[in-house]
Amino acid sequence: MPPAAEAVCAEDETVGDEPGGEERRRFAVLRAPAAAALLTAALLCLATRLSRTYPFGPVTRNVVDLGQQYLPYHAYWRALLLGETHGDAFLNWNSGFGANFLGDIGTYLSSPFDLLVVFFPADRVELALYVVTAVKITAAAAAMALLLLRLRPGPWPVAAVLGTAYALSGWTLNYGATVPMWLDGLVAFPLLCLVGEWARTGRRPVLGPLVVALAWIANFYTAYMATLGAAVVLAVRLLTAEETAGARQRLAGALRAARSVLIGIGLAAPLVVVVFLATKVADPTPETTFAPAPWTDVLARFLPATASVASPALFIGTPALALALTLPFNRAVAPRVRAGWTAAILLVTLSLQWEPTHLLWHAGASPNGIPYRQTFVLCGLLLIGAWFSAARGVPRPAALLAGTALLGALAWAARGSVDIDRWTFPAFGAAALLALVAVLLALGAQRKSTARVLPVLAVVLLVAAQAGEAAVTGKRIEEQQRAKVSWSPRVGPWHATAAAEVARADAWPRHRTDPGEVPGGNDVLLVGGQGADYYSSLTADVTSRTLASLGFGHYAKGRHPVTLDNPVADALFSIGTRLRSKPTEPVRQDAAPRATVTATTTPVPPLVTVRPPGRPATHPGDSAFARQERLLGADVYELPAPRRTGRTLTARCPAGSQVWFWAPEYKGTAALAGERPVSFDGKPPSVRAPMQALGTVPDSGAVRIGLGPEGKVRLPREPVGCLVRARLDSAVRELTATGATRVRATGHTVTAELPPGSKGVAVLAAPRISGWRCAADEADARPARAYQGLVAVPLDGRASTVTCSFRPPGMRLGGAIGGGGLRALGPAGVQRPRRAPPLRGFRP
């Protein structure tokens, strides 16, 4: 070991014996986490700057779900925390005409780091999300550096560099940075490993379960994976560490760890159970069959500047990887330690590629999109292996040669992978060269004890090699993502203008205000209003099916329903004000878009209406037009039977009526004779095209629609509906006259006053998702009925009010489990803690 490193270790091991030494030792141990956090933050910002990405450049970083899902959710979360929303923690009135928001909180927003959004103004939500992301990543670096020093004493600068390597792994740069909720799992893994260490040595019986609870509350999905990874680490430690050499000690340590995990999960149950039950009623995605990635691609992902969602992101930096590869050959490490960590790393690597273990890592369901979400655990194991190989000094030449040979063989085998970038091998070669020079300097310092400068230069070169590769990798991954996947523009004037119009026109709960289409997704979460737009993993199946049946479109296989600019839909959902936007310039990656926004207000029925007993006499059939009429209770469309000749549809409709075209699986254009073509983008099952207006029927009554399909033409039996506006106006007047005379909405509760003698069914214009309970007058609340997919309450003619309230399913069960966890935590806290084993003389 270089003299400087020996001095560091000696200081860490002996200061505890001096007066005030315990405090000094703790301060010394904290140097590595602090250095890792600072280095990680600097490199993350540098990579962002090199890629010219916001906030260090003009280019959007809102790729895929980051712009369409997580950014809007954080904007709404800020507004909710500051009391600026109509809904509360139970119900989100802005999205999907009423959505289970506690489930969304537990899925996207329950991390303590997400509370930082309240410190930023509303027009800086992108900056707030970047800061949240950066803080999570730096916290992961600090946690890993702390774990490494807890596992085995060693030079703190090396621990700091390896902590940074973990936080800026390929998994973070390729996946985590654009899915911020997963980053909580990155933080959780080293923390849960620390919980395992405490359990193994009989320490911190209260703090351990609390850390587990916090990890599962922050993001239970990746916390589950981190818990499995921590179990692997604990198993290796129980089998290899001298403090747990006896079978009884190992069993006791394992039982203490299991107790910490069970109590911690129990404490998190009030939120976890709600999310779990919400997934059971969510719109199902198509089943995915796991297909392992080619091993050439797997090996390529260890190298810098590679990006893909189809293979595991395993880059940890060439110097760190080289150290990890020396572990099996490093005779300075005890044989059982080498064997244990090498076996764990190999087995976890193989588990990524085998379907049964793949399903185990993902809680039994192969995910859509990124199939290697657990890769951060393997990155952590590799860095723990690197630490055990380097903690006692630079590995011997034989181990270095063997590790270098493995590294070269890996790079050679990966050369033909499709994931290799033009920057990959230049960055790999430069980092390997710097690491080699650092090793030579460190070896030279071992021979010349007076050469104090050599260890410092070695550390500097190690940092340069690791840092340069991470910065280049971050830069190239961001550039590749923007070029290959969908993106949303930066938040700017368009959103601000729409938000101002929504605020001016908002009349909730008298009627809804729909912001229309704003670039990105989840528009209503960004600009306000109460529309259909909603993108969540927990989008209820009832919401998706109900809206789709009425002609709404969707993305993400049904989990992202979008607005429908249709007057019948507006009447059904009490959308009295609708915004329409027209961009004034092309939407670009490097500029925030501008647009003109207009608001149109029309008379609509109230939020709660009354349908008379019996079924209305409307058009039969299962088309969206017929379903709209059944829900409205009036015949407002003429539904001709169009004749198709080649690429032309012909029919006859009342003159002056409005032609609507409904073809959810159609991709191409449709144009009414004399009108401009309208685009449809149906791509089943992922994308469903909404119904759209084509124009007005001429005086002749002849309807002629020209089709411009892209591929096979897929049309329903009744693709054309001609809306007679006078009939709709009459239906609106009737529903308004018989509907609620007054509606009040507070958080997750709606109360409506009804005309005297109302009979039939009171209908709340919200999808009947699980959790709604209603009552007429002072009767006991019961689970709400459904009327064509909407919330309904039977009326007998005597009730003057109806009240409907939403409570997320699972709250009582989760609360009961959480209470049990609290009771179990009490006895754990009164146990006599064991003293930690002394650092001095410790050998792995």
Image (cartoon, rainbow, N blue to C red):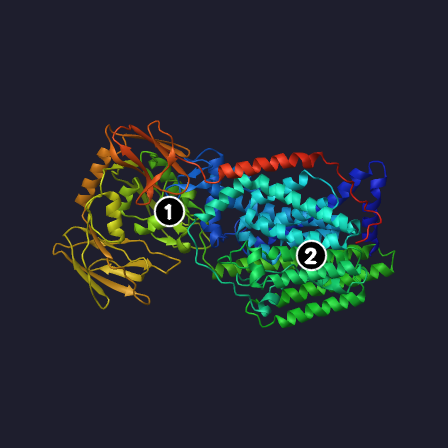
Q: Position of residue 31 (x, y in %)?
A: 73, 45
Q: Which mark is residue 669?
A: none
The x, y position of residue 411, in whole percent, is: 65, 69
- Does residue 765 appear anywhere in the picture? no
Residue at the farthest left position: 700
Q: Say few, some or many: other residues with alpha carbon within 10 Å of mark 1 (under 14 / 14 to 19 / 20 or more).
A: many
Q: Quadrant of the C terminus?
A: bottom right
Which residue lies under the disc numbered 1? Answer: 543
Earlier residue among tags 1 and 2: 2
Q: CA distance from mark 1 to mark 2?
A: 45 Å
Residue holding disc 2:
383
- Tell how many labels: 2
Q: Position of residue 176 (x, y in %)?
A: 56, 53
Seen in the picture, residue 552 relative to 202 is either above or below; the reply is: below
- In the rendered image, which quarter contains the N terminus? bottom right
212 left or right of 634 in image:
right
Q: Residue at x 74, y 55 (%)?
A: 239
Position of residue 640 in the picture relative to residue 197 (left or right): left
Residue 207 visible somewhere in the drawing = yes
Q: Nearer the viewer, mark 1 or mark 2?
A: 1
What residue is drawn where x is 36% and y is 45%? Answer: 532
Q: Say which amino acid is labelled 2.
A: Leu
Say whether marks 1 and 2 touch (CB < 8 Å): no
Amino acid on which disc 1 is placed: Thr
Measured from the top left, where is residue 356 in percent x and y? 56, 61
Circle 2: element type: helix
Numbered disc 1: secondary structure: helix
* Depth order, front residue of 423/722: 722
